[in-house]
Image: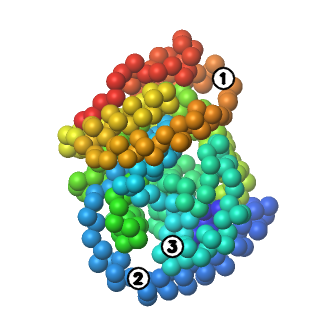
Amino acid sequence: MIWHGMTCSGVWRLFRFKPLLHWSRLHRILSLPFSGIYNSVMSALESAVYGRRVRNTKIEHPPLFVLGYWRSGTTLLQTLLSHDPQFQHLGLYRALFPWHFLLSEKLVTTLTAPFVPAKRPMDNIKVSWDAPQEDDLSLCIMSQVSSCMLLSHPHDPSQFWRALKLHELPPEELQRWKDSLMLLVKKQTFASSKRIMMKSPIHTYHIPTLLEMFPNARFLYIHRNPYNVFRSSCHLRHRMIDENTLGKSVYEGTEEEVISTYRYGFEKYEKDRELIPQGRLHEISFEKMEQDPVGELRSAYEGLHLPGFDDLEKALQPELESLKRYKKNEFHDNPYWVDRVYDQLRPAFERFGYPKPGTVPNNQNATNEPSNV
């Protein structure tokens, strides 16, 4: 449960937002004060040991941000990139315990590795303490400005939307989010001098702020058939709510929310991508990457002027067979939502070259070529 990484102040802010509570989740609710105390103590200890050195750490290599709506293939892309020895990524333990991983990671992960689930609850992706994760988990724990806040407020979509629209946040909340991200990047840089590769779909909505913080950052945007994204995103929300809510699981309105947030994210990305300097943004198709991961990644490295592709290609060779065997979730189509998604998201279908659902198999490749801007 992601709330177990919060300090006492984080737990207090979580309850100040009035999350949905229910007696059936009492064991989750009662555990939070104890985990909050533990994280607060460990955070203070880590700060005493490493605080000054972390604050003085300089970020020599601008990060690479993986963008794209949830379930567009960002996890697959992040996993493939994590095999590149020039990159470091945010592992599961660091994502869940961002306040003190410098101090606690080695011991805790060694002792608890046998108890980590083999696969993620929403799909069949393998899990380990070092498996690449979204920094949005950490930002939820550290700042309480995150798409993950929806999991404590499944009845209130406004908690999700406030994290999409950073420009509408009160100044103190925006600063807390920015300070949290910068601290996370500095801690990772302190732990390793390698370039940071970060993935969070919500950063697709944050391009102006990311450019303000990291002017030389590079961006890799992945897209997928919007209808397949819709089906998988609804499933993801249901599973994540079940795993993390402090109240009853509420799914009402999920479909319309996925459509509206996808549409807003697409429109915002189309506008904000113009802010990214030429040669620092590359777009990639999930469908094409599934068929030819090496070729698509080669094009991405060339488009972003990234060195070291030969090392990545060599590291990926043992993984290619397992990628072919990966089994995706299967869903049943509802004709109403097939038409609804296409009607509402037609600009995205047309922009990325996807046909209307039902006219060809949903796994057909997009017709457009990957592009770099």
Residue 337: horizontal and vertical position, in percent?
Answer: 60, 25
Q: Residue 184 location in percent, x, y?
A: 41, 67
Of residues 343 and 216, the one nearer the viewer is 216
Q: Which structural element holds mark 1?
A: loop
Closer to the chain start, of discs 2 and 3, is 2
| Residue in the picture at 59% in, 61% down | 129
Left or right of residue 41: residue 168:
left
Q: Residue furthest left?
A: 278
Image quadrant where residue 362 sits: top right
Q: Is residue 71 left or right of residue 152?
A: left
Asked which quadrant contains residue 285, the reply is top left
For marks 1 and 3, give the one nearer the viewer.
3
**Residue reaching furthest to the top:** 359
The disc placed on residue 85 is: none
Q: Is residue 292 above or below residue 314?
A: above
In front: 241, or 59?
Answer: 59
Q: Please name the residue that numbered disc 3 is placed on.
A: 101
Secondary element type, mark 3: helix
Q: Position of residue 264 (x, y in %)?
A: 41, 38
Q: Is residue 271 visible?
A: no
Label annotation for residue 334:
1
Tag 2: residue type? Tyr
Say the numbered circle drawn on residue 50.
2
Describe the element under mark 2 as helix, strand or loop.
helix
Left or right: where 105 falls relative to 69: right
